[in-house]
Amino acid sequence: MINRRSITAGGLLAISAFGQIVRAEVACTPLDGNGVQICTAGIQLGRTRTDRQECKNWCWAACIQAIFRLNEKKVSQSRIVQKLFGDNVCSAAIGPQIVGVISGDWTTDDGEAFTALSEPLLDLQFGVANANAAAMVAQELGEGRPVINGALGHATILTAMTYYRDVFGRGIPQEIVVRDPWPRNPNRRVLSRQEASGTFFIAKVQIDS
């Protein structure tokens, strides 16, 4: 659970030992008479099933774990939660906490050191509103980097998006494909219209060895 306090034309190969980012790309149709294109940005994960949350409020931690794993960095959910809260409490997290806990130095469960960096592309709860958020998400996907998507209090991993793009590069999402950590939901699914319109948080994640 994410706590709201009440509330690309290119390709990349990155085959992982833990996950399978097979290809990432952005592809667009030619401009129509109104200067609009239909574009798809996405990451192909093959048969990979991303991590499921280990308690009802750890969707955010499962998303972090899955993104780390797709970058060949194995870190348990409990260690991610402990880094934020100091204990394995089954607690939700808000946007700044998610971004803050990701960013910094890490050690994998096998002892390998790496650094991660996160940045909010959208966080309506804390005043981060970005008219170019869709275009920025597409750029991340085109580079092979999935993003964390928070909608209606639940975090998922956004792996693909179909959107309209105008001559200024601005995007309007039409379909959003995610990997869902909730055990009772399909792992790969399309966000409902209600969920898509209820998106309030998006964060990019970059991993440096």
Image (cartoon, grey):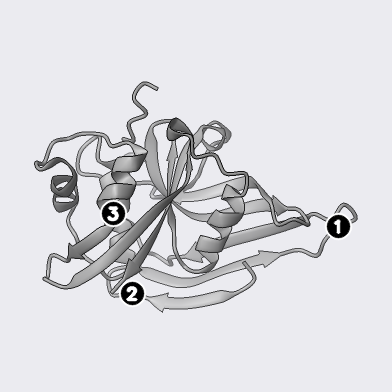
> Tag 1's secondary structure?
loop
Label 1 crowd (10 A; few <14 / some 14-19 / many >=20): few
Going by the image, does 147 lie left or right of 36?
left
- Three-letter amino acid code at the position of disc 1: Asp
Residue 114: x percent and y percent?
23, 69
> Tag 3's secondary structure?
helix
- Is mark 3 in CB contact (under 8 Å) with mark 1? no
Q: Which residue is mark 2?
A: 16
The CA distance from mark 3 to mark 1 is 41 Å
Q: Which mark is residue 102?
A: 3
Quarter containing the N terminus? top left
> Tag 2's secondary structure?
loop
Residue at 54 percent across and 39 percent down: it is 129
Q: Which residue is mark 1?
A: 32
Residue 62: x percent and y percent?
27, 49
Label 3 crowd (10 A; few <14 / some 14-19 / many >=20): many
